[in-house]
Image (cartoon, rainbow, N blue to C red):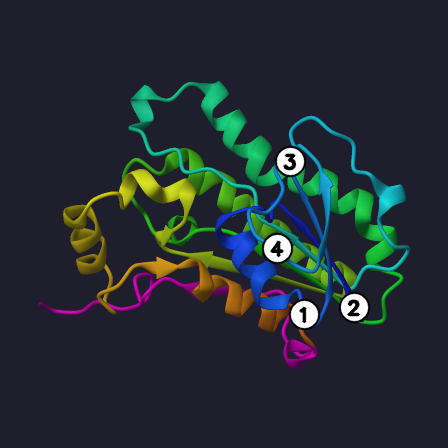
């Protein structure tokens, strides 16, 4: 059974991935809180912003790595301070790099390891009030492509770039019927995302079904980044 590490798998997209994959993989969930459900996983308490990775509690060989922590910091540029950009870069990018560097020896021991990272539709589209998160997620995309090139064919690295998805992190944008209706209307497919939509893609990218895919940014965004639909 293949070993997969999920950084941040206790709720939202990470939990959806765990619920989808826990019967076929040995999952190691590293998060501040335990998943609020009974799953066949190994839970290890871990705060990505402050704790050292518990490498001794993980197997010598890892076949997959998923980094789920992120932020949604939407404010006008004039209202942002440098510290706000630094905070978004820390959680979305720098801590990702720290975790991946620590786990790389275990990932490169596998014959077909896969890394799945998360970006945002805002990294490729000009969206107002997204300057900080756009910068952080664009860093993730550029990093993933470079890493995929450097470690091919030993390691596959791909990115999922969603639009607004219904998770606890995004609850304030979807916590009323009116907000949900407006969110639906912004997407050509007339629906915002669900955690399971992203989990299905992550599971595919981690599997051998995606053995010929690397260095890609998969846009799961209801058509937002590529389609212009007339009303």
Q: Nearer the viewer, residue 193 or 217?
A: 193
Q: Secondary structure at mark 3?
A: helix
Residue range of the region highlighted in magenta in the rendering: 208-231
Q: Looking at the image, tell me whether mark 4 or mark 3 is earlier in sequence order.
A: 4
Which marked residue is nearer to the observer: mark 1 or mark 4? 4
Which residue is found at the position 67% from the left and 74% from the top? 207
Q: Secondary structure at mark 2?
A: loop
Q: Looking at the image, tell me whether mark 2 or mark 1 is earlier in sequence order.
A: 2
Tell me the residue that label 4 is attached to: 38
Crowding at label 2, few (<14), some or many (≥20) Cα neighbours within 10 Å? some
Q: Kindly report the distance in space between the C-alpha atoms of the residues bearing marks 3 and 2.
A: 27 Å
Dot label at residue 47: none
Tell me the residue that label 1 is attached to: 23
Tell me the residue that label 2 is attached to: 2
Q: In the rendered image of this protein, does residue 52 appear above or below residue 124?
A: above
Tell me the residue that label 3 is attached to: 94
Q: Quadrant of residue 3?
A: bottom right
Whether residue 219 is in magenta: the answer is: yes
Whether residue 126 is in magenta: the answer is: no
Crowding at label 1, few (<14), some or many (≥20) Cα neighbours within 10 Å? few
Q: In the rendered image of this protein, does residue 105 appear above or below residue 96?
A: below
Q: Secondary structure at mark 4?
A: loop
Which residue is found at the position 62% from the left and 65% from the top? 215
Do residues under tags 2 and 1 come within 8 Å of each other at their CB atoms? no
């Amino acid at each position: 059974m293949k070993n997969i590490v999920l950084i941040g798998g206790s709720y939202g997209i990470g939990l959806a991935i765990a619920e989808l994959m826990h019967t076929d993989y040995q999952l190691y969930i590293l998060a501040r809180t335990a998943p609020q459900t009974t799953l066949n996983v190994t839970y290890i308490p871990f705060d990505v912003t402050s704790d050292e990775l518990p490498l001794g509690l993980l197997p010598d060989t890892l076949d997959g790595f998923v980094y789920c922590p992120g932020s949604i910091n939407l404010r006008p540029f004039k209202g942002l301070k440098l510290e706000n950009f630094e905070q978004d870069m820390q959680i979305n990018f720098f801590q990702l790099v720290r975790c991946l560097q620590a786990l790389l020896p275990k990932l490169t021991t596998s014959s077909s390891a896969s890394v799945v990272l998360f970006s945002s539709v805002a990294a490729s589209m000009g969206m107002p009030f997204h300057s900080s998160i756009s910068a952080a997620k664009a860093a993730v995309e550029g990093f993933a492509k470079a890493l995929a090139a450097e470690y091919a064919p030993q390691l596959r690295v791909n990115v999922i770039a969603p639009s607004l998805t219904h998770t606890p992190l995004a609850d304030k944008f979807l916590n009323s019927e009116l907000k949900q209706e407006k969110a639906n209307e912004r997407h050509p497919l007339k629906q915002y995302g669900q955690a399971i939509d992203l989990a299905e893609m992550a599971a595919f990218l981690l599997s051998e079904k995606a053995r010929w895919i690397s260095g890609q940014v998969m846009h799961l965004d209801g058509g937002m980044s590529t389609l212009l639909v007339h009303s």
